[in-house]
Amino acid sequence: MQQRSLPAILAALRHPWRTIVISVAIFAVTMMMASFLKTDLLGAAGQNSLYIAQTLPAGSSLEASDEAAKKIEDVLASDPDVDTYSTTVNGPETGSENSFNITLKDDSEAEIATNRLSNQIDGLGDDVGEIDLQDASGSANEDVEIKLSGSDLSALGEAADSVTKKMSETEGVTNARNDLASDQPIIHVDVNREKAADYGYSQAEVGQAIAAALHGSEAGTLTLEGKERDIFLAPTHPDATPGEIRALELPVTEVQTQNAQEDATDAVEEKTDRRAEEAKAKAEEESADQLDSAREARDNAADQLEEARKALRDAQNPPPAPSPATWPPTKWNRQKKASNRQRRA
């Protein structure tokens, strides 16, 4: 990368659009390129407390923060001048910045121990994030910030890297860094307030649900083997795309539970009413069929009764016997007539 002088860099970024902050901790002498920088007498006699801030890339998980912190702890545990230290590990919800409070032994040379720790931690590489080692006992330690502004983000990034590199090479300067690495893509979630309210959500609750899906969430504490431990729910969608975020399932609210209960009650009542109506219609239909059958049986009985009455009347009042002359001729009658004719003859 082409090197530029600080005045040339600043002249190339005259149009303000974006700001990059470069922080520099000054220890002993005036910086060659910036005569206004102040001096920090870190490691003065009698100072035996140090503080380390470990900043990881934005969005780092709690597991990644813990692994990075363990690497620093290994350095502190093996250093002969470190008496005690305490570690605070943070996840993405709190900025992914770990902190270490260090107490050196009384007979140690604070400046020598500090330089040795700084060199050892620098040798760990980029996996441990950005390290800021400071004297925590109240000495005059100051940060100097240089702001670069410009409309071209690419040129601005090159300028920030160039200035940071130049300052890190300057004698007496430690922990030169810029905040360009913290720039991350931002997704804006537009919540339909009226629709969310219908389901019992507030904007904050929607945001918390999305954050939990992307970064996980704390679920309380658990005492295990005499130690209190935090319970952390792992993220369900750590690398979600905007489309996946839009399709996230939100937790059920009390309003949704109440609506579901009311809908279930209404459905049961509707089903019960429908069954009652069906039973009533079936009973009416069966009653009508029974009535028709009874009417048909009544009519049949009436017909049978009428026929029986007619037969009884006929039996009680038989018709008169027909006279013989009108009887139809039979074989005997014909024979008798023939005999009579023969006699007359």
Image: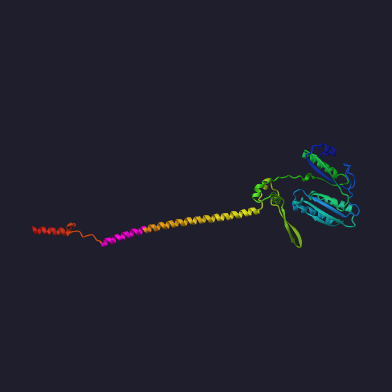
Q: Residue at x 79, y 42 (%)?
A: 19
Q: Quadrant of the N terminus?
A: top right
Looking at the image, the residue that sits furthest to the right is 45
- Residue 181 visible in rendering: yes
Q: Nearer the viewer, residue 114 or 38?
A: 38
x and y percent of residue 97 in the render? Answer: 78, 51
x and y percent of residue 196 in the render? Answer: 66, 49
Q: Nearer the viewer, residue 125 or 189?
A: 189
| Magenta highlight on residue 276 | no
Q: Nearer the viewer, residue 325 or 159?
A: 325
Residue 262: image quadrant is bottom right
Horizontal arrangement in the rendering, residue 46 relative to residue 1 (left or right): right
Q: Nearer the viewer, residue 133 or 314?
A: 314
- How many labels were placed on the picture? 0
Q: Is residue 221 above or below residue 239?
A: below
- Colour convention of the picture: rainbow
Horizontal arrangement in the rendering, residue 206 relative to residue 47 (left or right): left
- Residue 79 visible in rendering: no
Looking at the image, the residue that sits furthest to the left is 345
x and y percent of residue 303 in the render? Answer: 33, 58
x and y percent of residue 80 in the render? Answer: 86, 56
For the record, the magenta segment spans: 299-316
Q: Quadrant of the C terminus?
A: bottom left
Q: Main secondary structure of the magenta part?
A: helix
